[in-house]
Image (cartoon, rainbow, N blue to C red):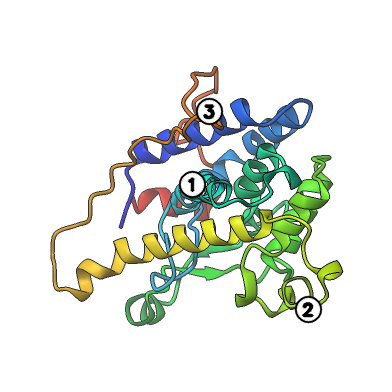
Amino acid sequence: MNLTAEQIQDNWNELMRVIETNISSPRKEKLLEFYEQYADRLMLMPAAHKKEYHNAFPGGYVEHVLRVIRCANKQYNLWEDEGADMSTFTFEELIFSALNHDLGKMGDEEQESYIPQTDNWRKEKLGEDYMFNTKVPFASVPDRGLFILQSHGIQYTFNEMLAIQTHDGLYDKANEKYLMNYMPEQKPRTSLPFILHQADLMAARIEFEREWLPKLKGDKKSVDTGKGNFTLGNKPNMSKKTSTKTKALGTFKSDSLKNMLDSL
């Protein structure tokens, strides 16, 4: 699976429109400033380091985030239709959490987490197109993402913190303290963490199927990669035109980012 440079640019512009039209001031301006500051890195980031996971290709991160946002909107409507108490969180909290749930994958202030794999054997035999950058100190993805947000003065609510922290559900044992409590008083007071987890799980599974099911079936035809309509119904607005500055894809300074661009 690969995206063209134009698709990567379109997805980035769509992500900026999500922030512009669904996040309130003054947090909106701080988020836009942060995302523009790291546009080079975020625009080309993969969502994972190996093909067996999901969206392990240049631009895969932003495409994944957009899909999680769409899936979160659909899960919101489903939970609401089935009678969940949606007054326990705001729709902006849902969009903010989905937008930033995997932000910790970007690395630290200076270095990206995923860099092109240099071991051809691991690349060819294990499907590891990327490897972890050992210059970046270890932190879990949720912890690093929350640290990055606060270090840039971007505030988040308790609901958003809990949703981002637990978005991997019980796949991450660190979440057991939040999700495996048996006393009602200790259970999450909102369905937001569960909605975000289900949206992320849905998006990752769909991305896995798109990459692997045709291969497992022996189908040589590529799966349709059209991005479709990103408008999130009548709740958030992801289609409103804005004055988002277009980033030229050929101006990256990082050697690893240039290598990613060259692979398109």
Residue found at x 83% / y 75%: 183
Q: Rounded to the nearest whole Å, what is the CA distance between mark 2 and mark 3?
A: 38 Å
Q: Is mark 1 on a helix, strand or loop?
A: helix
Image coordinates of residue 228 in percent, x first then y, are 33, 38
Which of the two discs, 1 and 3, labels the residue nearer the N terminus? 1
Q: Out of 97 and 126, give the one closest to the viewer.
A: 97
Q: Which residue has dot 3 on it? A: 237
* Name of the residue lying farthest toward the front: 83
The quarter of the rendered structure image containing the N terminus is bottom left
Q: Which amino acid does label 2 sit on?
A: Tyr
Q: Which amino acid does label 1 sit on?
A: Lys
Q: What element carries label 3?
A: loop
166 up-or-down from 235: above or below: below
Q: Rounded to the nearest whole Å, what is the CA distance between mark 1 and mark 2?
A: 28 Å
- Circle 1 or circle 3, nearest the eye: 1
Residue 210: mark = none
Residue 203 is drawn in which quadrant?
Answer: bottom left
Residue 217 is drawn in which quadrant?
Answer: bottom left
Left or right, 21 with respect to 117, comes to right
Residue 182: mark = 2
Residue found at x 30% / y 61%: 210
- Circle 2 or circle 3, nearest the eye: 2
Which of the two discs, 2 and 3, labels the residue nearer the N terminus? 2
Q: Is mark 2 on a helix, strand or loop?
A: loop
Q: How crowded is mark 1: few (under 14 residues within 10 Å), some or many (20 or more)?
A: some
Image coordinates of residue 119 in percent, x first then y, are 43, 77
Q: Out of 167 and 13, give the one closest to the viewer.
A: 167
Q: Which residue has dot 1 on it? A: 74
